[in-house]
Image (tube, rainbow, N blue to C red):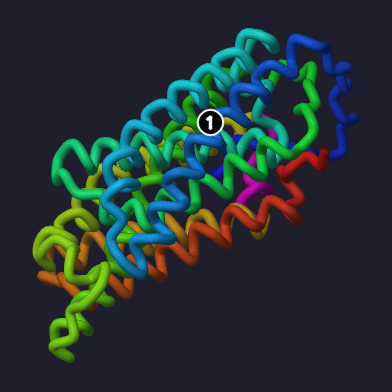
Amino acid sequence: MDMEAGAIIVASRPHPRLAPISADQSMPLVWLKVAVAFYAVGLLWATATVSRPCNFLSKIVFPALGLGMVFHFVSLAESAMTTGHLTLTLVSIHESESLLAFVILAFFLLVYAKYKTLSPGIFVFPLAFLLTFASSIGQGPPLFDSKLMRSGWIFAHIALIFTGYAALFLSFGASILYLLQERSLKAHRLAGYLSRLPALEVIDEIGYKSLLLGFPFMTFGLIAGSVVAQEHFGPMYFLDAKILLSLLMWAVYMVLLYTRWNSGWRGRKAAYLATFAFIAAVSAWAANYFSGVHRFVAQ
């Protein structure tokens, strides 16, 4: 079951006790706001790059990203130390947004280390900024005294699922870049940002390798969530809309990889299917707002 961070299981049992927010719990929010300031450089770079190259921003965007991730990691680490367990800080939508942004950026760094291109950053940097900004303006996270949230299975589920989401988003970004560049090449109108993109083969490989790396994380993340759900709810959790959408997302993910392995689907067909898989993932995430099994906690 896709029981993401930021979504707490709800059933007919009483809600866990809310703990008051102490002064120590405000420091992670301070570090997160510092990270947002650095991530704003990435947002400016992505905005400027669409119209024309900006050499100054291109030189500082990567160092700014690195510093932002350092402060972002400190924010997550202090939250974990304050509550005694990382998963206890991730029961709200704001905290889950923060962690998801960090995982996406970490996955982007892996892509950059391999291909030495900032091109996916045109999607990654704005998303990371928006997620962390939304998290930073939220109130302090409610702390839940829940034994379930301290489960190792829950922690494994969160880490694995979010890595799968990050891979799926990078694949989606690469798919959009592929479709845009392919259309421009056919029209013989390579200009602006598109003229500075890697070759189509490189973009296609980024999308494919992202899927290939993310699929095992997504699969084992769903298994970890299913173990917890089976123990606490039994087979009834399969009827929840959230679960059905999560299974659909995983099925599309698997079909996408299968068609690439066995049918030779590449380029445009693979890009369209990757886009559909990403839409399914967004739908599964949004289902947290009305799921009967678990949902985001309002702040």
Residue 15 position in % (x across, y down): 87, 30
Which image quadrant is residue 107 in? top left
Q: Magenta segment range?
A: 232-239
Q: Relative to 65, is 99 on the left or the right?
A: right
Q: Residues within 10 Å of mark 1 (few under 14, many from 20)?
A: many
Task: Please report the residue visible at 49 percent of the width from the left and 58 percent of the height from the top.
Answer: 281
Furthest residue toward bottom: 187
Give whichever of 109, 166 is nearer the camera. 109
Q: Is residue 273 magenta?
A: no
> Compared to 232, does 27 lie above or below?
above
Q: Which residue is mark 1?
A: 35
Residue 169 position in % (x across, y down): 39, 54
Task: Please report the residue visible at 39 percent of the width from the left and 60 percent of the height from the top.
Answer: 48
Q: Relative to 261, is 171 on the left or the right?
A: right
Task: Please report the residue visible at 50 percent of the width from the left and 22 percent of the height from the top.
Answer: 71
Give whichever of 195, 104 is nearer the camera. 195
Q: Relative to 111, is 281 on the left or the right?
A: right
Secondary structure of the magenta portion, mostly? helix
> Compared to 95, does 25 lie above or below?
above
- Tag 1 secondary structure: helix
Q: Is residue 236 magenta?
A: yes
> Compared to 216, does 211 lie above or below?
below
Q: Judge whether residue 152 can be spotted in this image.
A: yes
Residue 235 position in % (x across, y down): 63, 45
Q: Amino acid at mark 1?
A: Ala
> Compared to 165, does 16 lie above or below?
above
Residue 21 position in % (x across, y down): 84, 18
Task: Please report the residue visible at 21 percent of the width from the left and 77 percent of the height from the top.
Answer: 191
Which quadrant does the N terminus fall into?
A: top right
Which quadrant does the C terminus fall into?
A: top right
